[in-house]
Amino acid sequence: MKVSLFLTCLADVVYPASVGQSTVEVLERLGCEVDFPKKQTCCGQPAFNSGFHRESKEVAQHMIRTFEHAEYVVSPSGSCVSMLKEYPHLFADDPEWADRASQLADKSYELTQFIVEVLKVEDVGAELEANVTYHTSCHMTRLLGVREAPMKLLANVKGLKFTELPNKQQCCGFGGTFSVKMVPISEQMVNEKVEHIEETNADVLIGADLGCLMNIGGRIERQGKPVKVMHIAEVLNSQGS
C-alpha cells in the first residue's frame, strides 16, 4: 500500500526528528511504502479560519495538485486533515476544483484513523512503561470525527497505565489564531488543562495534534511540571527499553 505523508507545518519545522520519523517508521513496519511530496505546504487552515477564503483557495489548489498522484494521504494531525476535508466546501462553486478537492478529501486520513480503519490494525507492537493520559483535540474529534482509533491503539501498547483526563472535552486554549487574539482567555484554558493533567498523576501526556501539544507542553514547561509530552506517533513507535 502506497502512502503519501502530509507532515504539516509544525511537524516539519518543530518536530521532524520525532513525530515525522516516528510516523514513517510505524507505517513502514505495517507494510506501507511511504513517499514525501516535497512541494507540500501549509494546508491553508490559518488563513481559512481567519476569513481569508480567497487566499486559502490558492493554497488548497497547490495542495490538491501536490497530492493528486497519491493513493492515500496520511498525516499525524487530525486538525490539518480536517482542513483537507474542508476543500470540497471551499470549491463548492467551482465544479472542476470541487471534484479534484473531493478526491483528495476522500483519500486523506489522520494517522491513527488510517491504521485502524484502513489497515485494520489495532496493535502495532509498541511498548512503553509509563503512567499516561490523553488529550482529545477539538478539531480531530469534533470536525474529523476521530475518537475511538487513538484509544484502540493505546489500549494495546504494552506497559501503558492509562488514566482518563478529567473534562477531556474542554479545549486546551490553542485554537490556532484564537491563542493569539484571545490571550488572557487562552491562558486560563491551558492552565485548567494542566491542572486536570496533574489530577491524573500521569508521567506522560499523549496527544495527536501538535498545536495542542505545543500549547500544553509550553505551559507545562514554564510551570516546571514533571510531565513529558508525546505525540501518539512517538508512542506507537516506542519499542520499550
Image (cartoon, grey):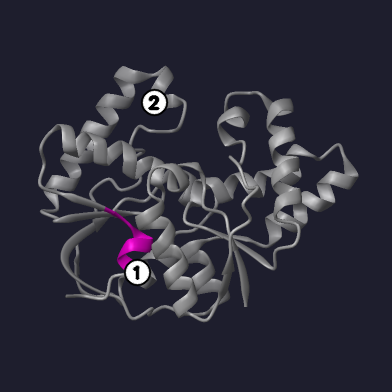
Which is more N-terminal, label 2 or label 1? 2
Badge 1 crowding class, 10 Å Cα cut-off, few under 14, some 14 to 19, many 20 or more, is many
Q: Return the residue nearer the eye: 168 or 228.
A: 228
* Circle 2: residue type: Ser
* Circle 1: residue type: Leu
Q: Residue at x 54, y 46 (%)?
A: 80
Residue named by callout 2: 179
Residue 224 pos. (x, y %): 10, 37
Residue named by callout 1: 236
In whole angstroms, how far apart are the C-alphas of marks 1 and 2? 29 Å
Q: Give the answer, above or below, for where 191 lies relative to 7.
A: above
Quarter the N terminus occupies: bottom right
Left/right of residue 23 with respect to residue 204 in the rendered view: right
Q: Give the answer, above or below, for where 59 lies relative to 238.
A: above
Residue 131 pos. (x, y %): 15, 63
- SS for tag 2? helix
